[in-house]
Image (spheres, rainbow, N blue to C red):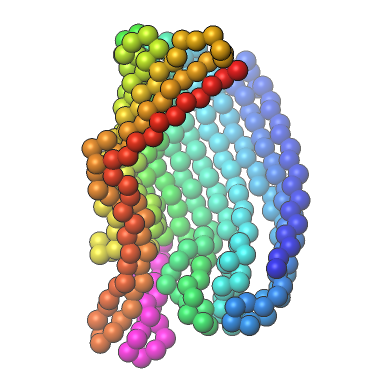
Amino acid sequence: TGLKKDLNLYAKYNYELTKDVNLFADFQYRKIDYSIGGLDDDLRDLKQTHNFEFFNPKVGIFYQVDGRQNLYANYARANREPNRDNYVDADPQGKQPTFETLNDFELGYKYTTSRFAFGVNAYYMLYQNQLILTGEINDVGAPIMTNVDNSYRAGLELMAGMKVTEKLKWDVNVTLSRNKIKGFSEFVDDWDNGGQVENKLGTTDLAFSPEIIANSQLSWMAAKGLTVSLQSYSVSKQYIDNSSSNDRKLNGYLLNNLKLTYRVPQKLAKEMNLHLLVNNLFDTQYENNAWVYSYIYGGERFAMDGYFPQAGINFLAGIDIKF
């Protein structure tokens, strides 16, 4: 069993430095009291208590350059406590999980007209004690989450929208990023000698963190009340563990969905729409998740893994009514 008490206090402040420049600040105070009791499946006593006090600030500046352009910059700090599984799975005789800290720096620009919009956001997210899987296990062989000293996510988010004609609109966004762990060590079960082998890999990629994610939506008003949209979604390759090994990765993929929406002319309700969605229009074969377990046997490294194929072309129809 577990009991978690979570107290939150918030404060917000906005100051108009000039008619075009605003300063803002958000503050959060959190106090957490967490207690766990009872016996685990292996009859281990789980009794433990944890207490945290966090101060999470966010400060920034917003500058309205003119009627079409604005600039902003902000900084935020966030702390997060481990969850119940992190505590319960931890080796009682080993390292205990501690809270994670994120320092987030962002700088952005937006430009908007009646027919075109563009935005760019640069970010740098520095983690301290991020909880990740390293291959370490507890006293009964279950994988545990381990704090790593230094990891980060840095990148650019690009957004654009264009009204090509009165009936054709195109929206697109792209995220380019680097997601790294510095000084990473992985642990691999040694079936020959027992225990685990530590491999110091230096700087590696965070698992399930593709460097490129892109979305596009092309919308066409084909007839009165009928809108046809082509939605495209692209993801680059990503690793399924934190070792950056090409033997343990998900390949990149591109998906396309077709959506038709028809607004039914009627007087029974305020609005009635019929929808038809064709998912995975071109029946692309891809996986978006996987698991892996690595071990050493006979002096060689092996892996057991499983990949999760996603649905091919499929259809969804629906109706929504607003009164």
Q: Nearer the viewer, residue 315 or 152?
A: 315
**Which residue lies most toward the bottom here?**
193
Residue 85 x/y as whole percent? 58, 66
Res 243 seen here: no
Relative to 154, say whether 1 is above or below: below
| Residue at figure coordinates x 67%, y 37% from the top left | 26
Residue 266 x/y as whole percent? 50, 10
Picture quadrant where residue 161 is located: top left
Judged left or right of residue 34, residue 115 is left
| Residue at figure coordinates x 71%, y 31% from the top left | 13
Judged left or right of residue 109, residue 267 is right
Magenta-drawn stretch, dominant element (helix, strand or loop): strand
Query: Magenta span has 106?
Result: no
Res 315 seen here: yes
Task: Say which quadrant the N terminus sits in.
Answer: bottom right
Q: Nearer the viewer, residue 160 or 62?
A: 160
Picture mark count: 0
Relative to 47, say whether 277 is above or below: above
Relative to 21, say whether 204 is above or below: below
Query: Magenta span has 201?
Result: yes
| Residue at figure coordinates x 36%, y 23% from the top left | 260
Magenta highlight range: 182-204
Task: Say which quadrant the C terminus sits in.
Answer: top right
Residue 74 x/y as whole percent? 55, 36
Judged left or right of residue 46, residue 134 is left
Residue 217 x/y as whole percent? 34, 27
| Residue at figure coordinates x 65%, y 31% from the top left | 24
